[in-house]
Image (spheres, grey):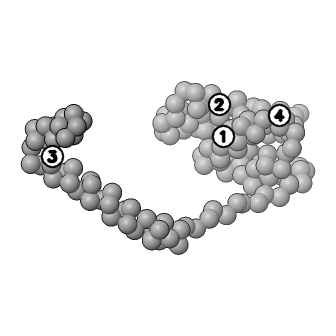
Amino acid sequence: MSIVEEVVTEMINGLSDAEKKIIRRRQSQKEYYARNREKKIAQTMSKYVPKKKIEYDIPTINKKTQYNRNEILGLLINDNNYNSESTKKTHVSAMNRIFDIVESFKELNKNFKSFVNTIENDKGFSTNTIKSTISSLLSILDRYNIEIIPVY
């Protein structure tokens, strides 16, 4: 018997009955998985449902545009002028976060104080998430020249 086998045997002998039972159970689970690996993979793959990618159309911007989720995400996702895909993803997730709270930018303009109160207190977002959301909002308003505040 080698030194390694002796050390392992001593370690196993020093364990309690419950710990030995756990080790035997783990070993039998490994062996079972090794025997039935292909079957298990086939079962898992049969249950797999691929996610459907939502397609957003580019909206036409006019005075009646509400700037809701579909319109803003349509602008963002179909925009090829982003320098970085990660920036684009950050803006999309921030817009989804905003539109979970309000229905449109017009509503956001009317109830801005309640929006800020909700995002700060009720949703439990971290400070950096709030900063990122607000900066994404401002960036999108600037990028697409969206005027949610009427100019007199």
The reply to whether dot 1 and dot 4 touch (C-beta < 8 Å) is: no
Q: Which residue is mark 2?
A: 132
Mark 3, secondary structure of its residue: helix
Disc 1 residue type (three-letter): Ala
| Crowdedness near tag 2: few (<14), some (14–19) or many (≥20) residues, C-alpha within 10 Å | some
The Cα atoms of the two marked residues, 3 and 2, are separated by 48 Å
Q: x, y percentage for residue 128?
A: 58, 27
Q: CA distance from mark 1 to mark 2?
A: 7 Å
Residue placed under numbered mark 4 in the picture: 83
Marks 1 and 2, the one that precedes in the sequence: 1
- Decide: marks 4, 2 in contact (CB < 8 A)? no
View extreme (front): residue:
1
Q: Mark 4 packing: few (<14 Cα in 10 Å), some, or many (20+)? A: few
Task: Report the mark closest to the observer, 1 or 3.
Answer: 3
**Which residue is labeled 3 in the image?**
19
Question: Which residue in the structure is indicated by mark 1?
Answer: 94
